[in-house]
Image (cartoon, rainbow, N blue to C red):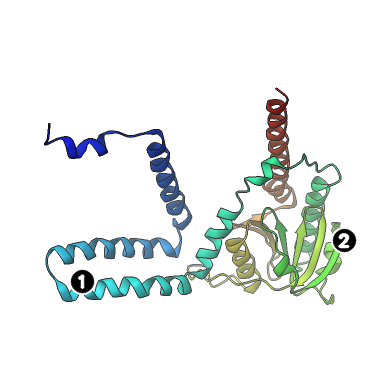
């Protein structure tokens, strides 16, 4: 009995311990999912390898190697923050999108928003711009708001219409050489500057407009519509991935599936949760 007495603390697992283990496992799972298929994935493997070498070198009494590894790990944390600032920012943005307090807010509706009409206008404008081989770069917000990006251009705050979009991207227009930011059914700004992607695996045939569209989709939760000035090809960038060869009809379906359901789902989810909380409170 005396032999098993030190193991008593490990045998008993309470409810709090289970919650603690599940939370840690969930955090590790989400971190792995965020860095998967990014540059940080390979670096994470290297960090794990170095962490395994530290106790191994100490156990083998490799004092010089252990000293170097310990000091490299201490300085390397600061270096990783500087080198992988875009990836860390993207991870923090994804974490910040989970809004717990929003479920307790008052019910919200989007009855005044014409999301479907905005999608139709964007698809129609993209098709007309494609026929004339007029370059265009349209960024459609979802959860992440692009106020800083909108500030680099000209604030418009106008209703979305195909005629206005085509006029803005007309060759002689002062705002044609930048990006357009659309929020819900409003054109927030035009002539905006976007960050270029740092993905070195992209084709050399992609120009600045496509690289800017991919770049903003990597750092923000948005849908980017790109019309090539050279070929008239319509492409869509989401989460750093570029999908080419869209027609006005297929673009309309793509935008409808990527934008409209999310707005309806978020508001319907809030209504349901608020309704349940109210019912429980009444009971």
Which of the 4 quarters of the picture holds residue 18? top left
Quadrant holding the C terminus: top right
Q: Residue at x 45, y 58 (%)?
A: 35
Q: Pinpoint residue 129: horizontal percent, then vertical percent.
A: 78, 63
Label 2 sits on a secondary structure element that is strand
- Residue 205 location in percent, x, y? 57, 71
Reply above or below: 182 against 133.
above
Q: Nearer the viewer, residue 163 or 21?
A: 21
Q: Is residue 231 above or below residue 2?
A: below
User: Dot 2: within a 10 Å radius of its alpha carbon, few (fewer than 14), some, or many (20 or more) residues?
Assistant: few
Q: CA distance from mark 1 to mark 2?
A: 62 Å
* Percent coordinates x, y for residue 171 in the rendering: 81, 74
Drawn side of residue 119 relative to residue 230, left or right: right
Position of residue 162 relative to residue 255, above or below, is below
Picture coordinates of residue 93, whole percent (x, y): 58, 58
Residue at image point 63% right, 68% down: 210
Label 1 crowding class (10 Å Cα cut-off): few <14, some 14-19, many 20+?
A: some
Of the image marks 1 and 2, the number of the one nearer the N terminus: 1
The residue identified by callout 1 is 66
**113 lies left or right of 260:** right
Tell me if residue 241 can be seen.
no
Q: Residue furthest front?
A: 2
Q: Which mark is residue 158?
A: 2
Name the image quarter holding the N terminus: top left
Closer to the camera, 35 or 126? Answer: 35
Which residue is painted at 69% across and 40% down in the image?
A: 104
Figure disc tally:
2
Which of 94 and 275 lies nearest the eye of the viewer? 275
Residue 94 lies in what quarter of the image? bottom right
The residue lying furthest to the top in this view is 283
């Amino acid at each position: 009995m005396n032999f098993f007495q030190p193991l008593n603390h490990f045998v008993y697992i309470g409810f709090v311990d289970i919650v603690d283990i599940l939370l840690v496992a969930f955090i590790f799972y989400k971190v792995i999912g965020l860095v998967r298929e990014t540059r940080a994935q390979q670096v994470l493997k290297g960090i794990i390898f170095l962490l395994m070498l530290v106790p191994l070198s100490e156990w083998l009494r490799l004092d010089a190697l252990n000293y170097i590894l310990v000091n490299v790990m201490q300085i390397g944390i600061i270096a990783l923050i500087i080198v992988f600032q875009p990836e860390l920012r993207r991870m923090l943005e994804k974490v910040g999108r989970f809004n717990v307090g929003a479920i307790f807010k008052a019910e919200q509706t989007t009855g005044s928003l014409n999301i479907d009409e905005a999608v139709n206008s964007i698809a129609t404008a993209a098709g007309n711009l494609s026929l004339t081989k007029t370059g265009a770069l349209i960024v459609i917000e979802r959860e992440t708001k692009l106020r800083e990006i909108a500030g680099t251009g000209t604030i418009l705050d106008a209703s979305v219409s195909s005629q206005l979009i085509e006029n803005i991207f007309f060759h002689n227009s002062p705002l044609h050489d930048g990006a357009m930011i659309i929020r819900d059914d409003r054109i927030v700004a035009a002539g905006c500057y976007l960050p270029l992607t740092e993905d070195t695996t992209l084709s050399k045939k992609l120009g600045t407009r496509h690289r800017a569209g991919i770049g903003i989709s990597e750092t923000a939760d948005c849908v980017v519509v790109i019309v090539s000035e050279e070929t008239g090809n319509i492409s869509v960038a989401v989460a750093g991935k570029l999908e080419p060869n869209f027609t006005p009809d297929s673009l309309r379906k793509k935008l409808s599936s990527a934008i409209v359901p999310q707005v309806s789902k978020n508001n319907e989810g809030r209504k349901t949760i608020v309704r349940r909380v109210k019912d429980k409170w009444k009971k």
